[in-house]
Each structure stands twice: as C-alpha cells, then as structure tokens.
C-alpha cells in the first residue's frame, strides 16, 4: 500500500491526538522496514455511541498511514466482564456491532476492504490459545490481574474469576492477531502494561501501545453506554440529538471536561480538517476554523457562544449519523437491534425482573444521578427547610428543597457528593420549586436518623446510578405522579447489613462501584 509518506510522516499521523504511546522506538523501527500492523478491540456489550467516532477517526489515520488494521469484536471479553452480555445475546450483539461499526466507518469515508474484521471466539476457543490462558494464569497474580482490569472491568465487592481472566486474554490477543501494536483508550493502560510484562515470559514479543485520551461525555464525565443522558446513540433521531446536546454541559468560557468541545477536537478536525461555527449575521456570521487551538481559544475568551457551538456540532453530527440511521431503517437491522438489546422493562423474565407487573416497574425507569452539593442556604419561608444547589452534570445546578440540615450540619453538606432522583415532577415547597429529590437512608424511631447516601470515591456529578441487572433500561423523561412509579419502587429500596444500597437485594451501582451508607444498616431509602 503505497501512501507516498515517509516513515516519520507515517509516525506523526499514527500518533497524532494520542494521549500516550508506549514503545515509540519499536514503532519507528517497524515503519523503517514495513507497514505497521495494529489492532483495536471492542467488547460487544452496550450499544456503541457517538464517542466511538473518536477511535474510528484514529483508524482512519492508521489507514492513511498505510497500516494493516484489524478490528476485533471481543465477544468472549463481553461475557467475562461481569456478564455484561448474556451468553444467549452474544452472537446477536456481535452482529449488531459489526453492522453499526461498518456503518460508522463508511460514514467517515473509511474503505472497509482495507480492514480485517475478527470475532474473539473465532480463535480464543482454540487448543493453543486455551493452553496459553492456563500458562499465563500460572504467572499472573490475583493482585496484578485485578489492578490491570481496575478501569475496564466492572468492579464489584465480590469479583468473579472471569473478570480476573479478562486482562490476560486481552494481552494474548496481541500475539494471536500477529500485530505490532494495540490501540485503545488510556483507561486500558494497566492492561497494556500487563501485556508488556507477561507476554515475553511466554516467549512472545512485547508490543507497542497507542492510547487515546478519554473524551468526556455530554455530562462532563466519561461517555458511557450505561449512562443514558451522557451519550448520543448512533441511531438517535435529529430531535434526540438536539435535546441531548441542549442538556450538555458546556458553560461559557469553560474548556475543561467539555464534551462538546472535545468532539470537535477528536472527531471533526481529524476527519474534516476544519470546523464551521454557524451563527446569526448580527453576531458576525459563520466562521470557518482550520485548527482546533483557535476554536478553543475563542471559546475560552467567550467569542464563541455555547449555543452556537452546540448548534454547529449538532449539524456536523447529524451529517455523520444520517447514513447510519438510513442503513438501520431496514427491517432486518431494526429486528437485530431490538433482539440484541431487548428493553428489560418490557421483557418478561428479564434479568432481575420477575415478569408482569415487576417488569413494568423496572428500577431503570428512575433517573438517579450522582450530584455534588454546591451551596446550602436556609429557606426564606420555613425554618425546617433548606435550599441545596446541586450539580447533577447539567449546565445549571438544580435547586433541591430538603430538611436534611436537621440531621447533618450545613458545613458537612457543602461540597458533599450525594444521590439525586432527577425525573420526579418538580414540586413547590413553601413557595420554592424543588427540582429534584435528595436520596437518603433513614431509620424511624426516637430520634429519627437520616443520612445521605454515598457514591463511590472518585464519582463525578451526573454519573448514572443503576440497579444490577437493569443497566440498559431507559429512564422515564418524567415520572407520572398518577402512576405512583416512584412510590411503588421505593418500597423495595433498603440498606443491607453490609451498609450497601439495594433494590430487592440487587445493588445500586455506578460504573465505579456500589452505593453505600455510613451508619444506617437496615434503613429504608427515600
């Protein structure tokens, strides 16, 4: 594949926009001799979303640089990672991933004939690979395996053995796919260093590793399949795209954790080489930027309004999504989507559900998020009530009216991370609208004891809280007060004897781990 580029130019193209490269010298050495062989793997779990355009645009770079690129649909990994993909859905999800990722690549103009597509179970069940898994498991300690998967494999209180095997299998993939380098997000770094440490012990070559930065989702935290509000699905309608971008965190002048700005940097510029800000002529009219630094500088100096940035990203994003939507209008692909990702709230006997009424009342209907209390002040018209301003990952903090200060001091609440139910109908409390509910554990008695719930350490405002087994369900836009959905679900919300928040004995979680309560063992949650 003659690209007309020198080895140095290829290296620059391969490594641009990456956060980190391990093994630069090895890459340069290979490029002097031949084309680089690189693979990108994706575990076939939740539906791919628009953040997948970030690795796709890097794959476009690799192909421009003449690389031989393999895309691995890691179906066995999807199962090993806390059974995020049930065995009976694995094959369907692989088919969905293959169709949707090919559609994404076509949408950005990547020629599919230059890519090799491989399914994990095509070779990971072979005698040789299986023996290597056993050989590796005789060398890797539990500590190293757990540490390697800490940012990738779902972390739970009692980890399954499958999650400990996951990093070793990913290391072996490098050898069995016969590549020079593996590409992934910087969240995979510990798996990459495990591969570098242990592959030579098996007599295999140490590979290079290329790492993308973690691009923030629309809430400012990592974009995640299990966080409905943080992601734009590849099949979302134009109306959904507009609605989600409208809610996106994008405050004037703030270039930190700005998912909208990051999308411009890591997707639109690499693909197009330019970006057009569309705006009213009275504000200067449209402006075409040829470098991201200039966009960032103008946004930081408030020369670009967040509304104009969102509208411009919306237009560019819809251009990318339109061919994917069209492809998935076919009856076969619509059926594939619905069978690979059945709605747990509508599926009789869904994992964690009990059929009938229970399925209709799936806890995934609750929009529970991590929040951060920014300020606490006294209600002007009620001694027992206080107003909390809580950041729940939206552009504006929400006002919550509560009586929590009767149990926890005002000082202790300041900057505290809490849990917030965000889709109840707002209620006026003594003249002031409470826009959400602060979730607390409580034990009745004399005196009554109340305590806010604690998200896992390192949580960010806006992160989605889910019940185990209901990760993929969609929250109601607004809970209908007449149907009493919250009241019916709340009955089964409790604190376990291990101080863990649960619904019907299933843990409340974020992607970082379980929700806990410091002292109120056996309390109810409301």
Image: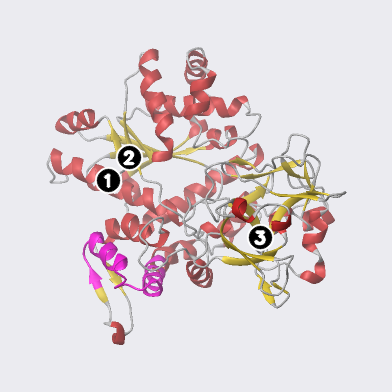
Residue 252 in the image: x percent, y percent?
38, 69
**Which quadrant of the view contains residue 430?**
bottom right
Query: Left or right: 201 with respect to 470?
Result: left
Q: Label for residue 475?
A: 3
Q: Nearer the viewer, residue 242 or 400?
A: 400
Residue marked by disc 1: 63
Q: Label for residue 69?
A: 2
Circles 1 and 2, Cβ within 8 Å, touching? The answer is: yes
Task: Specify few, some or many for label 2: CA neighbours under 10 Å numbering under 14, 14-19, or 20 or more.
Answer: many
Q: Residue furthest right?
A: 445
Disc 1 from disc 2: Cα separation: 7 Å
Residue 124 visible in the current orientation: no
The magenta stretch spans residue 96: no
Circles 3 and 2, Cβ within 8 Å, touching? The answer is: no
Magenta stretch, main secondary structure, is helix
**Which quadrant of the view contains residue 434?**
bottom right
Query: Left or right: 280 with respect to 503?
Result: left
Which element type, helix, strand or loop, lies under badge 3? loop
Disc 3 from disc 1: Cα separation: 39 Å
Query: Left or right: 69 with respect to 431?
Result: left
Q: Residue furthest bottom?
A: 282
């Amino acid at each position: 594949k003659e690209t007309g580029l020198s080895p140095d130019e290829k290296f620059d193209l391969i490594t641009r926009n990456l956060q980190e490269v391990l093994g630069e010298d090895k890459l340069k050495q290979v490029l002097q001799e031949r084309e680089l062989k690189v693979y990108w793997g994706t575990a076939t779990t939740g539906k791919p979303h628009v953040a997948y355009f970030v690795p796709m645009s890097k794959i476009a770079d690799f192909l421009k640089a003449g690389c031989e690129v393999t895309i691995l649909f890691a179906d066995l990994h999807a199962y090993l990672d806390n059974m995020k993909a049930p065995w009976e859905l694995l094959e369907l999800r692989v088919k969905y991933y293959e169709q949707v990722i090919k559609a994404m690549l076509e949408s950005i103009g990547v020629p599919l004939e230059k890519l090799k597509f491989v399914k994990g179970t095509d070779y990971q069940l072979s005698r040789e690979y299986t023996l290597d898994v056993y050989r590796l498991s005789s060398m890797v300690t539990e500590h190293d395996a757990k540490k390697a998967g800490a940012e990738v494999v779902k972390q739970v209180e009692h980890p399954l053995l499958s999650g400990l095997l996951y990093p070793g299998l990913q290391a072996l993939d490098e050898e069995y796919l016969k590549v020079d380098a593996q590409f992934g997000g910087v969240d995979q770094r510990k798996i990459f260093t495990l591969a570098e440490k242990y592959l030579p012990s098996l007599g295999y070559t140490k590979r290079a590793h290329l790492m993308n930065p973690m691009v923030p989702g629309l809430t400012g935290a990592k974009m995640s399949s299990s966080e409905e509000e943080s992601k734009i699905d590849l099949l979302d309608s134009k109306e959904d795209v507009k609605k989600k971008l409208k809610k996106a965190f994008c405050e004037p002048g703030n270039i930190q954790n700005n998912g909208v700005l990051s999308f411009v940097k890591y997707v639109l510029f690499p693909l197009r080489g330019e970006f057009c800000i569309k705006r009213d002529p009275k504000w200067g009219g449209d402006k075409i930027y040829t470098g991201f630094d200039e966009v960032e500088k103008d946004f930081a100096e408030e020369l670009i309004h967040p509304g104009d940035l969102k509208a411009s990203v919306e237009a560019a994003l819809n251009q990318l999504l339109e061919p994917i939507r069209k492809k998935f209008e076919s009856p076969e692909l619509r059926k594939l989507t619905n069978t690979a990702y059945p709605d747990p709230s509508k599926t009789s006997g869904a994992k964690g559900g009990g059929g009938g009424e229970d399925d209709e009342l799936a806890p995934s209907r609750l929009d529970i998020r991590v929040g951060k209390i920014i300020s606490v002040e006294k209600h002007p018209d009620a001694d027992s009530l206080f107003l909390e301003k809580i950041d729940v990952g939206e552009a504006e903090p929400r006002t919550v009216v509560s009586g929590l200060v009767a149990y926890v001091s005002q000082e202790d609440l300041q900057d505290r991370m809490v849990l917030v139910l965000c889709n109840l109908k707002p209620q006026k409390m003594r003249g002031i609208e409470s826009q959400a509910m602060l979730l607390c554990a409580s034990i009745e008695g004399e005196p009554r004891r109340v305590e806010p719930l604690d998200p896992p350490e390192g949580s960010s405002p806006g992160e989605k809280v889910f019940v185990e087994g209901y990760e993929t369900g969609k929250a109601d836009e607004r809970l209908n007060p007449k149907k009493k959905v919250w009241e019916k679900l709340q009955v089964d919300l409790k604190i376990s004897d291990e101080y863990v928040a649960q619904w019907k004995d299933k843990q409340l979680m974020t992607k970082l781990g379980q929700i806990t309560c410091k002292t109120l063992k056996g309390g109810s949650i409301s």
